[in-house]
Image (tube, rainbow, N blue to C red):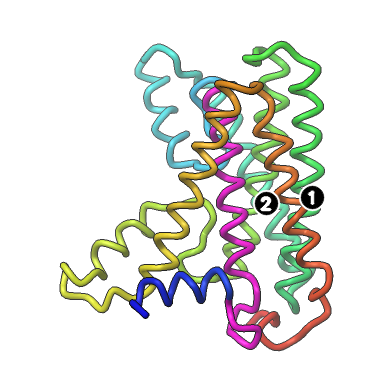
Amino acid sequence: MHPLLREARDTLVPRPAGPHGPLPPLLLALTLVTGLVDAFSYLVLGHVFVANMTGNVVFLGFALAGASGFSLTASLLALAAFAAGALLGGRLARALPAHRGRLLLAVCAAQTALVLAAWAVAAAADLPARGGVRAALIVLLGLAMGGQNAVVRRLAVPDLTTTVLTMTITGMAADGRLAGGPDAKAGSRLLSAAAMFAGALAGAALVGHSGQALPLPVAAAVLAAVSAALLPSRRTAGGWTAS
């Protein structure tokens, strides 16, 4: 089997005794959630991301320069909400340090509640959102995605950050055979990029053709499915135990 295909297979169907247990496919599912949620935030909340903070820093510069279509308030609010979520996620990681399965389950359960709350707000409002509704949606989703990122950082599964793809894509190119590298981790890196793309594509399609709020219940359903998948193995040891 080609090394890329073998790596992709091992990411999608990891060995039970592997160093990360079943975390890799679950983190791919969370990467899909990132694409869905950011599609909603950018297209419905107006040129703001709630998961990819690099974009918000750039948008903040655009807004300060007076570029049309960018909001200084929205970018700052998204950054603040994400940072608050990351702070809470960091505290959660320190409260549940011994077992990565229980930690991921806890943050996914919290995310599910926050995304469902955002869906309830969006469903009761006129979209695209403005004013206080827009701010509430940015805060709820920013908290959810900040918490996810803090916990995923603690899980430390290589190349599966669920959000930042710049270094993932850099690794695919710089470590590839054309660059004289061993092409290691190409399968998992490609899957990570594909999951983000699929989430963004699905989110944009839902916003454009089905209903502007629909990416949120879909994201909540994926989060609930990840939580359900974690329930049976939350007491296991071995590859689940954090270092």
- Residue hosting label 1: 110
- Residue hosting label 2: 147
Does residue 102 show up magenta in the picture? no
Percent x, y of residue 52: 50, 42
Query: What residue is at 58 percent from the left and 77 percent from the top?
Result: 14
Tally of numbered tags: 2
Does residue 35 show up magenta in the picture? yes
Image quadrant containing the C terminus: bottom right
Left of 83 or right of it: where is 89?
A: right
Q: CA distance from mark 1 to mark 2?
A: 9 Å
Secondary structure state at the residue bearing disc 1: helix
Range shown magenta: 14-43
Secondary structure state at the residue bearing disc 2: helix
Image vertical order of residue 7 relative to residue 132, above or below: below
Query: What residue is at 26 percent from the left and 79 percent from the top?
Result: 182
Image vertical order of residue 166 relative to residue 189, above or below: above
- Quarter of the figure with residue 240: bottom right
Q: Contact (CB < 8 A) between labels 1 and 2?
A: yes
* Sequence-first tag of 1 and 2: 1
Query: What residue is at 55 percent from the left and 37 percent from the top?
Result: 202
Query: Dot 1 surroundings within 10 Å: few (below 14), some, or many (20 or more)?
Result: some
- Front label number (1 vs 2): 1
Left of 6 or right of it: where is 42?
A: right
Image vertical order of residue 172 relative to residue 7, above or below: above
Query: What residue is at 68 percent from the left and 60 percent from the top?
Result: 90
Magenta region's main secondary structure?
helix
Under mark 2, the amino acid is Gly
